[in-house]
Amino acid sequence: MKWGKNIENIAKGKSPGKCPYCGSENTDYNCTIVIPEKRLGHMMIWCNDCMRGYHISRMEVPEGLKTDKEIPQGLKY
């Protein structure tokens, strides 16, 4: 999985790190909580330069992860 290292970085409380496609450091992520009582939802990771992204569905969203970031339009998966 190309975004594996980025997911590791986020889990360790860091920024996502370099884009696995273009090498840019201009990456970000956002989690969306769908079932609040269980903190279940999904996460998007993306590069703001090449507009590549990755979607992780059906996950428990740990406390402290971003949930208020706007996801850019036009991402390529």
Image (cartoon, rainbow, N blue to C red):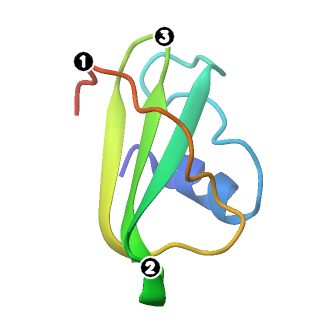
- Which image quarter: residue 50? top left
Amino acid of disc 2: Pro
| Cβ atoms at labels 2 and 3 below 8 Å apart | no
x then y, percent, for residue 60: 46, 79
Residue at mark 3: 49
Q: Earlier in the sequence, mark 2 or mark 3?
A: 2
Judge the density around disc 3: few (<14), some (14-19), many (≥20) Cα neighbours within 10 Å: few
SS under mark 3: loop
The residue labelled by disc 2 is 36
Upstream in sequence: badge 1 or badge 3: 3
Q: Position of residue 55 (x, y in %)?
A: 31, 50
Dot placed on the residue nearer the N-terminal end, 2 or 1: 2
Identify the residue shown where x is 62% and y is 29%: 18
**Three-letter amino acid code at the position of disc 1:** Gly
Q: Nearer the viewer, residue 54 or 35?
A: 35
Residue at left offset 34%, top offset 25%: 52
Please state if 6 lies on the left or on the right of 64 as rendered. Answer: left
Whole-number angstrom distance, CA of label 2 to CA of label 3: 32 Å
Q: Which residue is nearer to you in this view: 24 or 65?
A: 65
Q: Is residue 59 above or below residue 33?
A: below
Q: Is residue 63 above or below residue 5?
A: below
Please give the name of the residue rendered at 48% of the width and 55% of the height, measured from the top-left corner.
Answer: 31
Mark whose residue sits in front, 2 or 1: 2
Mark 1 highlights which residue? 74
Q: Position of residue 51 (x, y in %)?
A: 37, 18
Task: Check if mark 1's residue and mark 3's residue have beta carbons within 8 Å.
Answer: no
Residue depicted at x 48% and y 80%: 39
Q: CA distance from mark 2 to mark 1?
A: 28 Å
* 2 or 3: mark nearer the eye: 2
